[in-house]
Amino acid sequence: MATVTVMLSLGLTAHGQGPIGQFQDSGDVGAPALAGTTAYNPVTQSYGLSAGGTNIWANRDEFQFTWRKLSGDFILQAQIAFVGAGVEPHRKAGLISRST
């Protein structure tokens, strides 16, 4: 299980079905053995994502994903930091923006 803290410039609400801070929802992609979580801390305006799964370099993807649908022009900024040593030496975090 790896934990990453994300500070985004875009209310602690635990992961669940529905809004998490500025995001609409979150969930696992793939079928990781350990379910991931997403939480938001309104005081520090930071998001914490924890996830476990296979490394995305392999034949399948398993990770925690938090999303929000937007339209029009927008700016997305983030400061990403891993918390602790983690299990996977090649753990990853990133931002995705796509047209569909």
Image (cartoon, rainbow, N blue to C red):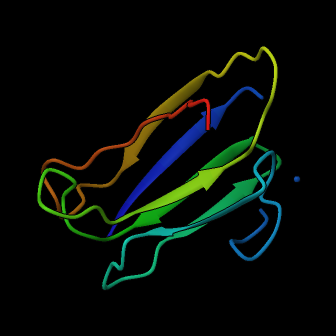
- The structure residue drawn at horizontal position 78% and vertical position 14%, both measured from the top left corner, is 73
Image location (x, y in percent) of residue 2: 33, 62
How many callouts does the rendering have? Answer: 0
- The vertical placement of 34 against 99, above or below, is below
Q: Which quarter of the figure has residue 9?
A: top right
Q: Which of 83 and 96 is in front in this view?
A: 96
Image location (x, y in percent) of residue 47: 64, 49
- The structure residue drawn at horizontal position 40% and vertical position 66%, both measured from the top left corner, is 51
Image location (x, y in percent) of residue 91: 24, 50
- Side of 1 where 69 appears, left or right: right
- The vertical placement of 43 against 88, above or below, is above
Q: Which of 21 and 63 is in front in this view?
A: 63
- The structure residue drawn at horizontal position 83% and vertical position 61%, both measured from the top left corner, is 19
Q: Nearer the viewer, residue 22 or 85?
A: 22
In which quadrant of the rendered image does the C terminus lie? top right
In which quadrant of the rendered image does the N terminus lie? bottom left
- The vertical placement of 63 against 45, above or below, is below
- The structure residue drawn at horizontal position 37% and vertical position 45%, both measured from the top left corner, is 82
- In the rendered image, the residue lying farthest to the front is 100
Image location (x, y in percent) of residue 22: 80, 45
- The vertical placement of 76 against 94, above or below, is above
- In the rendered image, the residue lying farthest to the bottom is 33
